[in-house]
Amino acid sequence: MKIHACAVAALLASLSCAHAQAVPEKFKTAGKIVIATVANYPPVTFKDPATNTLSGYDIDVGNAIGQRLGVKVEWQETSFEQMISAVTTERVDLILAGMNDLPERRELIDFVDYMQSGVQYFVQQKRTDEFKSVADLCGKTVGASRRTNFPKEIESWSQENCVKSGKPAVKILGTEGSADARAQLRQGRIDAGAQGNETLPYLMGLEANTYKLLGEPFAMTYQGIGVSKKNPGLRDAVAAALKAMIADGSYQAIVDKYGVQPSGLKSIAINGKPLD
């Protein structure tokens, strides 16, 4: 039986969907892409305590992208503050570190958006009776990583939900990271913490009966894979690989593995604009 040429082309396209966008020649020649990360945000990125190897949602996503593009992934641990500089000067090729895709960051780099995140309040389980609703946070001290946009979002939330109602504003403490905020919460130095909603189910599983979620996540935003504006071809190749992963279910498998279902996307976006 004869097969129409168009049908053959369609079949071949479906079989090679992971390579819908070829990786630029310089990365193909190098045989690798270098990805910056920081292993302090479980289950997004962390060190496996048994092997001391990089693990997490971002690590699996990055390795899968490299596999689909036919290049090796070389992970480079970098401080969060240095990541944008590292990618703009091309010391690294990508950032995969739970970085929020914010308008001010888009002025420096491009983002391939691969998950979403919202600010989630939490308190100590033993203080549940003091915090029956988020309104009970007014006038209290909330800690959140100063490296994120969480303090700014909490300030906006406080203005809307506390100050406008005649209640005292939330006191915001910028911490050295989310782990520091949780440590200060356990020590009683702050009344509540705030961090990405994608991380807390995992942490609550590790530290049973320690924390209680308060209210619903707010200020939802995309998290993106950072790419230099000098490398639009790499950006598009990464987006194509992620799109193929969504289509064949491998993306969802990684989401399910790390329990970050509320943060999973149905379609990929670039700089906040969905591709579909």
Image (cartoon, rainbow, N blue to C red):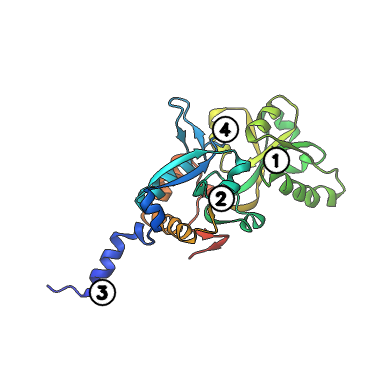
Q: Residues within 10 Å of mark 1 (few under 14, many from 20)?
A: some
Q: Is label 3 in a helix, a strand or a loop?
A: helix
Q: Residue at x 72, y 44 (%)?
A: 151
Q: CA distance from mark 1 to mark 3?
A: 55 Å
Q: Earlier in the sequence, mark 2 or mark 1?
A: 2
Q: Earlier in the sequence, mark 4 or mark 1?
A: 1
Q: CA distance from mark 4 to mark 1?
A: 22 Å
Task: From the viewer's side, name the closer residue of 91 and 250.
Answer: 91
Q: Percent from the top left, x then y, of residue 216? A: 65, 46
Q: Is label 1 in a helix, a strand or a loop?
A: loop
Q: Earlier in the sequence, mark 3 or mark 2?
A: 3
Q: Residue at x 34, y 60 (%)?
A: 17
Q: Earlier in the sequence, mark 3 or mark 4?
A: 3
Label 1 amino acid?
Arg
For this view, does 264 lie left or right of residue 244? right
Label 3 amino acid?
Cys
Q: Are marks 3 and 4 in contact (CB under 8 Å)?
A: no
For this view, does 145 lie left or right of residue 198? right
For this view, does 117 lie left or right of residue 245? right
Q: Percent from the top left, x then y, of residue 94? A: 50, 49
Q: Are marks 1 and 3 in contact (CB under 8 Å)?
A: no
Q: Select label 2 or label 1 by which is in front.
A: 2
Q: CA distance from mark 4 to mark 2?
A: 38 Å
Q: Percent from the top left, x then y, of residue 231? A: 49, 58
Label 2 amino acid?
Thr
Task: From the viewer's side, name the closer residue of 134 and 29.
Answer: 29
Q: Earlier in the sequence, mark 1 or mark 3?
A: 3
Q: Earlier in the sequence, mark 4 or mark 2?
A: 2
Which residue is labeled 4 in the image? 204
Q: Residues within 10 Å of mark 3 (few under 14, many from 20)?
A: few
Which residue is labeled 3 in the image? 6
Label 4 amino acid?
Met
